[in-house]
Image: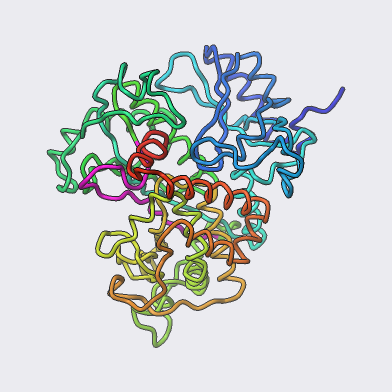
Amino acid sequence: MSASFAQRCGVADADWQAALARTTDAIRASGVEWVRVGWCDLHGGVRSKTLSVRAALSALHQGVGMPSTLLLKDTADRTAYKVFEPGGTEGLPGFAGAGNVVLLPDPASFQVLPWLSGTGWLRCQAWFPDGAPVTLDSRHLLRQATQRLAGHDLGLVCGLEVEFHIYRLKDPLHGRHLDPALADWPGPAPEVSLIHPGFHMLSDHCMDLSDEPLRIVRQTAQALGLPLLSVEVEFGPSQVEAVFDVTDALTAADHMVLFRNAVRQALHRAGYHATFMCRPPFEHIMSSGWHLHQSVVVLDSGRNAFVREAPAPCSTPADAEHTLSDTGAAWLAGLLHHAPGMTALCTPTANGYGRFQANALAPDAVVWGLDNRGAMLRVVGGAGQAATRIENRLGEPAANPYVYLAAQIHAGLDGLTRRLAPPPATESPYATEATRLPRSLPHALQALAADAVLCQGLGAEWVASFQRAKQLEHLRRSEAPDVREFDRREYFNRL
């Protein structure tokens, strides 16, 4: 009997086989008629195929084909490489001619979609037909990073705070975004109104105004088993925030991909439009950030390796070693050292750079602070406190979660291995002579290209592909006659 594709990929170990048996039974018992097999693209969006139950069960063993060009798209779905020209994919073996890669579902990921009758869901990873992993697959990047960290008997754990916007669709069925006469590439954005007026953070009245869409968010997340802790009204008009409990890094990234995809679809069916773009194209908005709480645990014990039992001798609160262990201080130093190179990975859209403004609860410079929300890195906790952690406030909610988290590992691990020391904490994050964050996407891409540690960790092929797609995005935006209209179509309509 010939080996299954999963066996050729080397993933069909005992845990995989056990999950396969459980999921096969679960799919048959669930009564679903169709199963979506979904995959996360370069930009954090979900692509999927909808398979019959019979085809889905086969795909668990043999995978299902997908055009390789989906790994080479920019944010407007334009292929960044000339795949049909000789040499057009030089440096990217396996992509010439737009041939297939194979999506292999993870049997442990099966869900019944709560907003859609009779439909299940499986998360996939991309492989070449010979069973080799596709190095451009962003989930593969995070798996590699976590394995590298595990080689030091350490694991990254993360808690997510995700700001985003929810609007009410003015005409859900016949809006201009669905007018065939206005179809374009990308098409027009929907017309919307607010769900709450904003500028009244945590207002109980604004929460009551927003109850229906936020109830959909809560119910959808809970039905999918996501560890949602709260949904809150944020400061900006129609802006909200979702907070998730701590999980390991790969699970956290999986949850973020599933959450964004699920709430956008569930809300749209109820007449709402959710967007995870940083700065929606309206006046008087507040930028959305994705604040990533992180700590490192010792794998064999689960102990938080950032916790220091007592402040270091002769230290002051401005010293990292007053709050963080030596491991935590070195990790903090690594995040600071690689912050310019990380910026394009954590804030990957051209729109997101408008967020880096002084006194806007967003970072402006490469600094850290003790419980300071103006700093790029906010250290939370204290000596002897089990939940001591670092909050990275650099990211935007549209970031690819696998890439965002992989960047933390490569940067933090470099701080550990080189025993880097962080500077003193800041009390004035917006009045500092510290290095400023890149002010635009091109500057951030230049900083990434200059960061040898991040480029090596992510791989030259992936970095080159990311750079190329993002440069095309920037070029099209810089040439657009109306940047705000570009943002409406490219980001508000699609992210």
- The quarter of the picture where residue 460 lies is bottom right
Q: Residue furthest left?
A: 205
Q: Is residue 382 left or right of residue 145?
A: left
Q: What span is in magenta?
A: 275-297
Q: Residue at x 38, y 31 (%)?
A: 263
Looking at the image, which is closer to me, 318 or 193? 193
Q: Position of residue 410 (x, y in %)?
A: 58, 61
Could you tell me residue 415's position as x and y percent? 55, 71
Residue ID at (66%, 24%): 21
- Residue, far bottom: 314
Is 342 drawn above or below residue 22 in the view shown?
Answer: below
Comparing 169 with 166, the one in front is 169
Magenta region includes residue 388: no
Residue 181 seen by the camera: yes
Decide which of 116, 322 is in the foreground and name it. Answer: 116
25 left or right of 276 in image: right
Image coords of residue 299 (percent x, y):
59, 57
Q: Residue at x 52, y 49 (%)?
A: 470
